[in-house]
Amino acid sequence: MPHPTQTTWFPLMTPIRLIALLFVFLWSGCAHLPPEKQSSRPFQFSIDRLGFSNETVWSYGDGEIKSERDHHQTTGEHYTRRCFVVSRSVVQFWKFARFEPSRPALDEKALAQRIREVTSIDVWKEPLPFEKRIVFTGYANLPQISAAHPKTFQANLGLGWPVYCRVGNMPMIIPPTRSHQENLFHEIVNDLHQGYPTIAWLVDFPGLRINHAATIYSILKDNPQKTVFLIYDPNDHLAPKKLTYNKKERSFYFQKTFYFKGGKIDVRPLYRSPIQ
């Protein structure tokens, strides 16, 4: 859900900034509780992603919005502004659903109901035991079933507009410190060693070259200088993307994509608790 390039922002009233500052201290002060136990299996891009992409509102070329004349995608139906929804939903399916391809497929009404059942469970809860998971029949995994029934999934995963009203959005106006980014890096690594992905908010406020959500699910490379993570990017369901942590700078860098020119960003955790 990237936003257009923007180099200025309107100053906020002092009371609002004070409230936000108080909240960010409360928000950042909530200790991250590591997973209670090792996951039964780690999140895997090949079987845990959706079979379609969140589409951008604007048309992009080489990481930048195209000309004013054609920057909006105005033809046809578009599944947009759902990067938070998609990043959250794939983790909910990983935690709370299972697939039985040998049984007859569900009809559209039953499928819609079960999608809503999965996405109604708070994503920060522990994974359900295998026997208690919500069953999806006729398909072997999430990309298969969602590619076969994209409209049903898109209509039932959740609305996009509520993410703009999240309590957890308030800290955005207060840039994270390098210590915060370093602590988050260690939390992500520790969770991945336990087999758990991190839903992450990728942002460079106030520039707004990027305002996006993604799912960090694996470590590709680690050395004394940097750690390269693999992420599931809702804007591209065909291939994983790379998020790099520079250990000396204590900073994150996101690779170049069709909607982002690449570079340094801030990362915040999402959906670890009701206030995130």
Image (cartoon, rainbow, N blue to C red):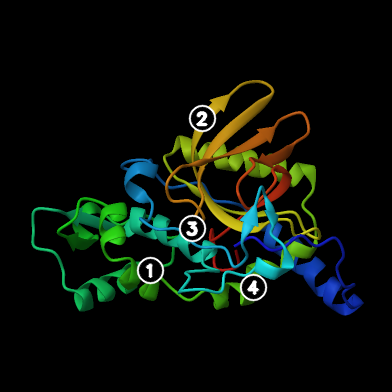
Is 69 on the left-hand or right-hand side of 269? right
Mark 4 crowd level (few <14, some 14–19, many ≥20, 10 Å Cα): few
- Disc on res. 167: 4
Residue at mark 1: 119
User: Toward which corner of the image does residue 7 lie, by quadrant?
Assistant: bottom right
Element at label 2: strand
Amino acid under disc 2 = Leu
- Disc on res. 87: 3
- Residue 87 drawn at (x, y percent): 48, 58
- Residue 73 shows up from this direction: yes
- Disc on res. 225: none
* Pointer 2 or 1: first along the chain: 1
Q: Residue furthest front?
A: 69
Amino acid under disc 4 = Val
Which residue is at a point 31% across and 53% down the rendered structure image?
A: 143
Residue at mark 2: 220
